[in-house]
Image (spheres, helix red, strand yellow):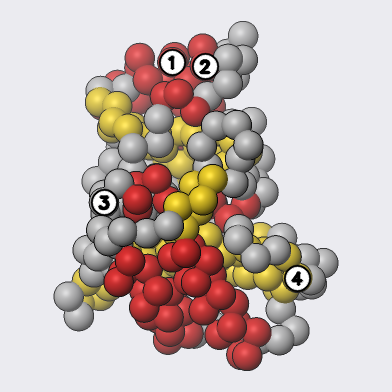
Amino acid sequence: MLPDIAFFDAIAEAAAAETLPRFRMPVTIDNKHASGFDPVTEADRAAEKAIRQLITERYPEHGILGEEHGDIGLDRDYVWVIDPIDGTRAFISGLPVWGTLVGLYHKGKAVMGMMDQPFTGERFIAKSGESVVKRNGAVSRLSTRKNVSLDQAIMMTTSPMIFPEALEPSYKRVEASVQLARYGCDCYAYAMVASGHIDLVVESDLKPYDVGGLIPLIEQAGGVMTTWTGGRPEMGGTIVASGSADLHEAVLELLNRN
């Protein structure tokens, strides 16, 4: 049996109890990479620990794929995919575009997902047939924008610098074709696609925990999310999220043009 929305609410509250008090406060930052900068904070670790505890207590037979504390039972039918703070760079910069991502996979496919942004008070949750946002005690159904051509589209990516040299020309073709390109919103950009405020997110080098909670939000709001070659996005990699199938097809054509 799939969890109910109330369980996702409990997860979000447990994580927020660890992240929100540390946001815009002095926090210890560790670098996970010997070269470059891949930050992790005590807020990341504490939030994932709180999430994992709730899942383990309620669904001990489920697997867990987490960014900070390792993996359990990835061969099980149900696997939870956790990113306690997606957008740690934004978190340590005081920018409220980070979020707690939790997805549930069934036999490898994302079936439920959540992006919680406790500072703004927005909680985006999706299950089969429904994608909603909870804000100020109200629940609103999400719907992507339709009938938007590529030259009318608003596109976001975390940074144009994330693309390796081999993929940069493909990305630049898309950026040059849209009406407006903006940078830096991490998981919040995907929530804005689901909400119908922007039309497109293009990224690369993503991990499963970067996308697991977001796939259902996009798909159940009427959008499309795949790899650059049109494959399922659950394992990350090069990712495109679009508000409509027509827009998605146009973007894939540009990304794969020789």
Which residue lies under the disc numbered 4?
A: 72
**Marks 2 and 3, how far apart in space?**
29 Å
Q: Residue at x 28, y 41 (%)?
A: 198
Q: Residue 113, how many percent across, how many down?
A: 49, 66
Outermost residue on the bottom side: it is 57
Dot 2 crowding, Cα within 10 Å, few <14, some 14–19, many 20+: some
Q: Earlier in the sequence, mark 1 or mark 3?
A: 3
Give the label, 2 or 3, closer to the camera: 3
Q: Residue at x 58, y 15 (%)?
A: 165
Along the line of sight, which residue is nearer the eye, 147 or 13?
13
23 over 87 or under it: above or below = below
Judge whether residue 141 can be spotted in this image: no
Q: Residue 104, how many percent across, how many down?
A: 60, 69
Q: Amino acid at mark 4?
A: Ile
243 over 52 or under it: above or below = above
**Marks 4 and 3, how far apart in space?**
32 Å
**Marks 2 and 1, how far apart in space?**
6 Å
**Marks 4 and 1, how far apart in space?**
39 Å
Q: Residue 8, how many percent across, how many down?
A: 46, 79
Mark carried by residue 168: 2
Q: Earlier in the sequence, mark 4 or mark 1?
A: 4
Asked if the residues shown at circle 2 and circle 1 are in contact, with their CB atoms under 8 angstroms apart, the answer is: yes
Which residue lies under the disc numbered 1?
A: 172
Q: Earlier in the sequence, mark 4 or mark 3?
A: 4
Q: Amino acid at mark 3?
A: Gly
Give the label, 4 or 3, closer to the camera: 3
Asked if the residues shown at circle 4 and circle 1 are in contact, with their CB atoms under 8 angstroms apart, the answer is: no
Dot 3 crowding, Cα within 10 Å, few <14, some 14–19, many 20+: few
Which residue lies under the disc numbered 3?
A: 94
Q: Earlier in the sequence, mark 2 or mark 4?
A: 4
